[in-house]
């Protein structure tokens, strides 16, 4: 009995397995995939012949069935705009013979476009309107596409032309049986922003808020200020970001557009609800597998008890990513500010680490793409990355910045340095460097004026990607821009004619001599300057070999070979001048060391500059010149958002020269950059009104700079200049001047600010030449 039961169970199990296999075999046999297509049959089509519809498809009789290919066919049919949207429905059947029949059910658009009319369009041509709508005569009439065309026309008027009150109506073409597409356009006026104001901004200055906006008001009622509704969305995002830097995480911004009766102008009011300013209650770094919370928190600057500052938080996120990145780990950090449930003014800040794995990545291949003219070595010298080394991820961004600063690649499509994805989990990561070259030659015409040098012109030809060895082999090399280009060198030919002085030079620079960290610069110069005491001419060559020792330190060695002429000397001039009449040969050798930690070259607010050097000159005269300079910048106050910095600058310079130093290499002071309140070279040893220069120069400045405008484009400065120039190594004739001035940044004149200073001597000597006002202004323009 038991044996019978077991036999019955075994038979049942075998039958079940067999049935399961037959079922799945039957399902596999029913699948159309891979089977030959017998026919493709369009259904419900009356306007377009079946052959025309099937001709748009790749799934055809005699070919194997592929579901992915059928989906592509459906998209192709939809793109014809012959059918109602969503009406194309396929069905697939496997016949008794094992072949596949595809049925495609459609619902056709019954009308075609006989005519397209744009009524009221005066500032957009019919051709451009047709490009916007993508509707042409003879196309199937599809109401949804006609509506999209209406919206495209409206966007053109509102967003690009600033005609925000324009209207576009679809009079005909909105119904399936229409035969014409008619748009009625009311263009309206170009709307200009007459004013921008804020309400509810208790903890943020209106002037600083305006600096965050993309929308700008009309300048002098004449220029710019075109209104764009989309800019308001960007403005609101920027205002919220700005408030986040001030500690307000839940700020609300609602713009109100107040239009004038003539509909040609608008006043924008940003209504702001600042909410509560957040204070940091605690900080944590979470999800890290490699490093402890305490070790990572030491990298962050945000501290409990401080107000929340989005700028500091983002800097902390970057520092944490760099902490991993310099160790070859590509980690990503996100921040999570969590409000305290009991006190909304308190926020707990979490830094969430992602990608925190234990393996270090290394540099694999370096692939350079896009440089048809520029040599690979030029790009490699900027990377600082070599195959096999630990991949320090922050260096990818640093390399990109260095490549951009070369000025030889398209700034609209800046260089890209990134890790290529790989299918395997190898520690070696390939690096792609993608660049897009641009024209690197410039022809510039401009000029400048200052109280030291008068009016000067400036004509310059500059090539930033010069190659002294790439001689042209054909006319095509010139036409394609390959001749003398591609090695990252710089060649500049400059002419500066002026009212008081003129200078002409040609300078060649190799930034990476023999692919090392040494740079080499050579300049051929001609210089002429007229002084009260004499006329000076110089012609010569100056070569400098530099080595960057660290990001802050640089050493250099300079040689100069010059012929210097002194002429047109007054008959009553002293021997200190007349002894140097005529042409003189000089050969100078100078060694120098520089340390620069400024945070900005043009507008420094912290850091310092130290420079020391000694030059030994031989030739017709033998003498030495030693100079040391030091400048310290300190920020004493700033706005909550980090702008509006009050900067204290302290400068000192000590220079010594041998007693045999000729008149043209001695020291002089007075004028902008030395001791203001006196004319250029109006301070120092003199004889009968003629300045003879000194062998000791000791110059000092205390200057305090305060921003006046919220834009930080206008500054007030007050200063105290003091120092002396002496004939011998002693201090007997000390000068002191006090004054004030302004620094004005005018973007259209270039990055250099205009400096206007008024100085008043508090202590002066007989024979000093006073000058209350000094100024400097640069003007730049032109290029190709």
Image: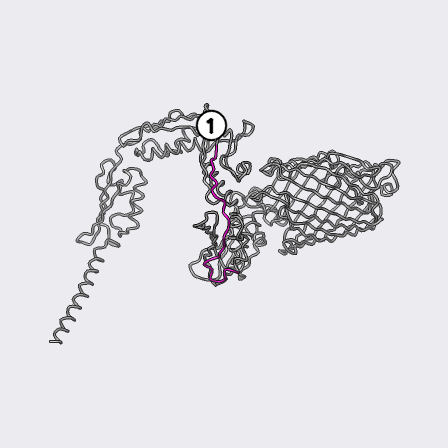
Q: How many marks?
A: 1
Q: Residues within 10 Å of mark 1 (few under 14, many from 20)?
A: some
Residue sitting nearer the eye, 537 or 170 = 170
Front residue (pair 425, 34): 425
Which residue is at the far left?
Answer: 1
Q: Is residue 401 left or right of residue 655?
A: left
Q: Is-magenta flag for residue 513?
A: no
Examine the image and state in which quarter residue 642 appears: top right
Instruction: Look at mark 1 in the image and give the residue it sits on.
Output: 190
Residue sitting at x 32%, y 40%: 79
x then y, percent, for residue 241: 49, 43
Answer yes or no: is residue 457 visible: no
Question: Is residue 320 visible to us here?
Answer: yes
Secondary structure beneath label 1? loop
Q: Is residue 767 left or right of residue 102?
A: right
Which residue is the extreme one toward the front?
A: 342
Q: Is residue 697 above or below residue 147?
A: below
- 351 and 687: which one is in front? 351
Figure quadrant of residue 287: bottom left
Q: Residue furthest top?
A: 262
The segment highlighted magenta reads 269-294
The quadrant the C terminus occupies is top right
Name which residue lies at 31% across and 39% down.
Answer: 80
Counting from the top left corner in percent of width and height, residue 298 is at 54, 58
Q: Quadrant of the N terminus?
A: bottom left
Percent x, y for residue 630?
Answer: 71, 49
| Magenta-colored stretch includes residue 270 | yes
Residue 367, compared with residue 121, is above or below; it is below
Find residue 738 and report its horizontal and vertical position in percent: 74, 38
């Amino acid at each position: 009995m038991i044996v019978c039961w077991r036999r019955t169970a075994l038979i049942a199990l075998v039958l079940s397995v067999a049935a399961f296999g037959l079922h799945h075999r039957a399902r596999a046999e029913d699948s159309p995939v891979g089977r030959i297509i017998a026919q493709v049959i369009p259904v419900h089509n009356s306007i377009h012949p079946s052959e025309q519809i099937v001709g748009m498809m790749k799934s055809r009789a005699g070919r194997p069935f592929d579901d992915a290919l059928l989906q592509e066919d459906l998209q192709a049919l939809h793109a014809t705009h012959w059918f109602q949207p969503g009406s194309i429905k396929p069905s697939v059947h496997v016949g008794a013979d094992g072949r596949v029949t595809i049925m495609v059910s459609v619902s056709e658009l019954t009308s075609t476009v006989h005519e397209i009319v744009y009524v009221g369009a005066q500032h957009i041509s019919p051709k451009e309107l047709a490009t916007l709508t993508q509707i042409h005569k003879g196309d199937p009439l599809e109401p949804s596409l006609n509506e999209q065309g209406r919206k495209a026309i409206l966007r053109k008027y509102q967003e690009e032309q600033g005609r925000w009150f324009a209207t576009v109506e679809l009079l005909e073409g909105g119904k399936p049986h229409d035969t014409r597409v008619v748009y009625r356009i009311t263009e309206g006026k170009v709307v200009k922003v007459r004013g921008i104001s804020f309400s509810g901004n208790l903890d943020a200055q209106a002037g600083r808020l305006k600096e965050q906006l993309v929308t700008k008001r009309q300048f002098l009622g004449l220029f710019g200020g075109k209104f764009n509704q989309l800019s308001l969305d960007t403005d609101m995002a920027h205002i919220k970001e700005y408030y986040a830097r001030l500690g307000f995480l839940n700020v609300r911004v609602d713009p109100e557009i107040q239009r004038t009766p003539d509909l040609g102008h608008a006043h924008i009011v940003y209504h702001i609800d600042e909410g509560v300013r957040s204070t940091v209650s605690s900080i944590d770094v979470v999800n890290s597998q490699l490093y402890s919370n305490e070790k990572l928190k030491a990298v962050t600057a945000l501290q409990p008890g401080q107000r929340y500052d989005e700028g500091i938080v983002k800097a902390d996120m970057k520092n944490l990513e760099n902490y991993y990145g310099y160790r070859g780990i590509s980690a990503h950090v996100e921040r999570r500010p969590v409000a305290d449930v009991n006190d909304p003014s308190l926020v707990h800040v979490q830094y969430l680490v992602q990608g925190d794995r234990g393996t270090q990545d290394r540099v694999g291949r370096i692939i350079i793409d896009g440089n048809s003219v520029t040599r690979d070595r030029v790009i490699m010298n900027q990377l600082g990355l070599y195959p096999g080394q630990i991949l320090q991820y922050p260096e990818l961004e640093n390399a990109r910045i260095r490549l951009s600063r070369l000025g030889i690649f398209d700034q609209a499509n800046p260089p890209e340095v990134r890790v290529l994805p790989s299918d395997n989990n190898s520690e070696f990561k390939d690096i792609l460097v993608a660049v897009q070259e641009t024209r690197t030659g410039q022809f510039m015409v401009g000029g400048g004026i200052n109280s030291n040098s008068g009016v000067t012109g400036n004509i310059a030809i500059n090539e930033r990607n010069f190659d002294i060895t790439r001689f042209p082999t054909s006319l095509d090399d010139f036409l394609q821009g390959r001749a003398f280009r591609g090695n990252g060198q710089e060649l500049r030919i400059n002419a500066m004619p002026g009212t008081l002085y003129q200078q002409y030079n040609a300078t060649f620079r190799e930034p990476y001599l023999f692919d090392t960290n040494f740079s080499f610069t050579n300049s051929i110069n001609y210089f002429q300057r007229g002084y009260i005491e004499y006329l000076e001419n110089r012609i010569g060559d100056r070569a400098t070999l530099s080595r960057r020792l660290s990001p802050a330190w640089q050493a250099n060695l300079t040689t100069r070979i010059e012929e210097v002429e002194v002429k047109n000397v007054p008959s009553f001039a002293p021997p200190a001048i007349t002894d140097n009449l005529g042409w003189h040969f000089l050969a100078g050798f100078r060694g120098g060391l520089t340390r620069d930690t400024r945070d900005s070259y043009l507008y420094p607010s912290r850091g310092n500059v130290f420079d020391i050097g000694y030059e030994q000159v031989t030739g017709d005269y033998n003498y030495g010149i030693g100079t040391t300079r030091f400048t310290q910048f300190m920020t004493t106050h700033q706005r909550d958002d980090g702008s509006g910095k009050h900067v204290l600058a302290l400068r000192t310079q000590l220079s010594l020269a041998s007693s045999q130093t000729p008149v043209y290499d001695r020291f002089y002071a007075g004028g902008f950059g030395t001791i203001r309140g006196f004319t250029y070279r109006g301070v120092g040893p003199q004889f009968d009104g003629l300045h003879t220069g000194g062998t000791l120069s000791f110059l000092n400045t205390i200057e305090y700079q305060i921003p006046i405008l919220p834009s930080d484009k206008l500054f007030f400065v007050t200063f105290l200049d003091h120092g002396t120039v002496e004939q011998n190594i002693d201090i007997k004739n000390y000068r002191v001047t006090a004054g004030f001035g302004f620094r004005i940044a005018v973007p259209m004149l270039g990055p250099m600010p205009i400096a206007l200073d008024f100085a008043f001597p508090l202590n002066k000597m007989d024979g000093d030449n006073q000058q209350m006002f000094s100024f400097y202004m640069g003007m730049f323009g032109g290029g190709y």
